[in-house]
Image: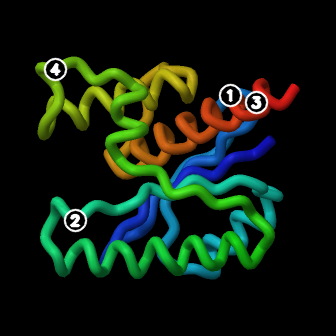
Amino acid sequence: MKILGIDPAAGKPNAYCIFENDRVIEWGKFKDYETYQDIIIRKMIKHVFIEDQYLGINFNAAKKLIEVQSILKYIAESLGCDVKLIHPKSWMSAIRIPVQARRGQERDQWIITLSKSLINGNGFFKLSIDEACAIQIAYYGARRLKKSYSKIG
């Protein structure tokens, strides 16, 4: 089962990660919606997890992010994907960030380190915080789906 995790962005490329069989198979950024649509079709994605937005940030920034998120959700649903919006606190609490690293650069570094460990962890590649968040969103989505399927079976 292939899962697509998205960290939406306004005014810059959106970060994504494809997770399959408990491992990261692809990650990166896309600038336009055609590329996003191509990723879903080419990789035969069935489940999409998009980071939800919260109004704790600047209102105008939140408004732009919600617009991007809505378009991403619409495209995925129109291609037959099951789409879930994931609140940032949901996936962040699941990765158990230490108290001393809950803000700023320490938090970002912790998320990047955890995300690199999901990609085989050799650390010899650059990973942006946006890509690292997309990886964690996809990982969270995969675990959530696994739990829901285990309840059914």
Q: State the SS at label 2.
A: loop
| Residue positioned 34% across, 73% down in the render | 65
Mark 3: amino acid: Asn
The residue wearing badge 3 is 21
The residue wearing badge 1 is 147
Q: Which of marks 2 and 3 is nearer the N terminus?
A: 3
Report the colour scheme: rainbow
The residue wearing badge 2 is 55
Using the numbered discs, state the Cα–Cα distance from disc 4 to disc 3 in whole angstroms.
31 Å
Mark 1: amino acid: Lys
* Image vertical order of residue 41 relative to residue 44, above or below: below
Whether residue 63 sits left or right of residue 20 in the image: it is: left
Measured as percent of width and height from the top left, residue 102 is found at 17, 30
Measured as percent of width and height from the top left, residue 50 is found at 51, 58
Please state which of residues 144 and 9 is positioned toward the viewer in this rendering.
144
Q: State the SS at label 1.
A: helix
Whether residue 3 sits left or right of residue 62 in the image: it is: right
Q: Can residue 126 be seen in this view?
A: no
Circle 4 or circle 1, nearest the eye: 1
Quick one: which residue is furthest to the front in this view? Answer: 152
| Residue positioned 80% across, 69% down in the render | 80
Circle 2 or circle 3, nearest the eye: 2
Using the numbered discs, state the Cα–Cα distance from disc 4 to disc 1 in whole angstroms.
27 Å
Please state which of residues 117 and 134 is positioned toward the viewer in this rendering.
134
Please state which of residues 134 and 78 is positioned toward the viewer in this rendering.
78
Mark 4: amino acid: Val
Mark 2: amino acid: Leu
Q: State the SS at label 4.
A: helix
Measured as percent of width and height from the top left, residue 124 is found at 43, 28
